[in-house]
Amino acid sequence: MFKIYEEYEEVKKKKDVKDDNDFNGVLNRKYDCIIVYEIQDLTEKQVKAIVESCNSNLLYFYGDPNQTINPTFFSFSRLTGVIKSIKKSISEINKELLKETYRSGPYLIKYINHLSDVRKKYIGAQKDCWDEHEKSLSKSRDDKWACLIEKKESLEEVFSIFFDSDDCIIIVNDEDDRKFLKDNFIELTNTSLILLVTEIKGLESKNIIAYNLISKNKQRFEEILSEKYKRSTIHRMIFNRLYVSLTRARESIIICETDLAEPIKEEMFKYSDEDGSPRKVEEVDDNLELVQSYITLSKNPNAFIKSAKKFQENNFFIQAKEKLEKARDLAKENEEFKQLEGTIERQIRVLDLIMEYENKKETMPIEKKNNFAEKLLQLEETQYARKIYSETLNKDALNILEYMIGKKELKEIYESINAKVFESEDTYKHIVLSKKFEEDYNSLINSYLK
């Protein structure tokens, strides 16, 4: 039995997922205020645990029922019921609909709104949800918002230029599709930029390549269009997977489908604007030159560094490293960017340290965790070092970092400075005894001596 438990914990670690036991571990204390994001992905049991962990009525839940892709059976009425059953003093729960988005351009949002209309027409609206159209506030390029590819040779063309895009990811249904692409398209063999629908929440990308999200569920989509499956939870979840994937795009979507029925193409890819103007997802199989107008290509390593930073901020460290390695290759090829090589190499070392830490931290003693933070500081990575020091409750180190980034005055952390906070003299050299710190420190000491 213990062996099964160990294997189960190992699978969780590899997939970077938590179960209810882990979740309850976080909520074994009380909080004055709790903010929850992606509420539609939580079960009633999890919501109940969150509400019970809040000392006050300061509870903020953010979510989108149209992005429900797990069988949580979420609805606002059920959420309200759970909250009121625990917080008896709450008589009314404020609801606010956010109808404007800065992520996607106006034409792309119009297409997303069309998909919402299709879902509402064939599956039905959820009774307590708002199904109003979104409005785009984005000023991004948007003249080419979506195209359709169905032929294998067209797929080969897309994947041949994929790695020249600084901001593009491929989204697939499941591990089988990810493996298929890696096995059948040599350009994709070693990439980490093929992500499952369940992995991409919270991410966004300038360009999205959506692979077989409809064809893989062809029967389900045909059932949806038959109008015999209204109110079906499983059909709504499958449709929402498509919706979630396409809403990751800021500028354009390349929809790749290898087994589409004509009625599905007609319903899903042709629509009208509010003024009645006809629109459609452009079919580009017979004009592959058009493909490049739907994917942004770059030879500037700075663009790939920026993309790597975005991945790192979202804890996609392997993907961040892949982008940095591309930036390094481009910097080596172009004399104009040679000076970036050192910066890129340092950031790759930072990511290697972070990934090593993430893999080992569950069994790592506090002292060793602090050592990892010091190594990161020596590479000038303060953000992740602060995260580690927060986990180890190293207040002295956190105080010094707060000063270094301008959040605290030197006099506030005087006692911390006099303590031996960091083990390595190199850390003092790089962080504590920087020129600015040294001058301020000496000035403060002199004022105390007077």
Image (spheres, grey):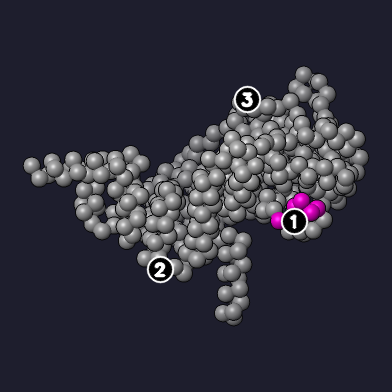
Tell me the CA gap for discs 1 and 2: 37 Å
Extent of the magenta region: 185-190
* Mark earlier in primary sequence (1, 3): 3
Q: Is residue 171 left or right of residue 215?
A: left
Which residue is at the far top?
275
Q: Residue at x 59, y 35 (%)?
A: 336
Disc 1: which residue: 189
Tell me the CA gap for discs 2 and 3: 48 Å
Q: Residue at x 77, y 19 (%)?
A: 275
Asked which secondary structure carries label 2, the reply is loop
Disc 2: which residue: 365
Horizontal and vertical percent position of residue 169: 69, 45
Residue type at mark 1: give it. Thr
Mark 1 crowd level (few <14, some 14–19, many ≥20, 10 Å Cα): some
Closer to us: 221 or 298: 298
Which residue is at the far left?
450
Position of residue 179 relative to residue 314, above or below, is: below
Residue type at mark 2: give it. Pro
Disc 3: which residue: 139
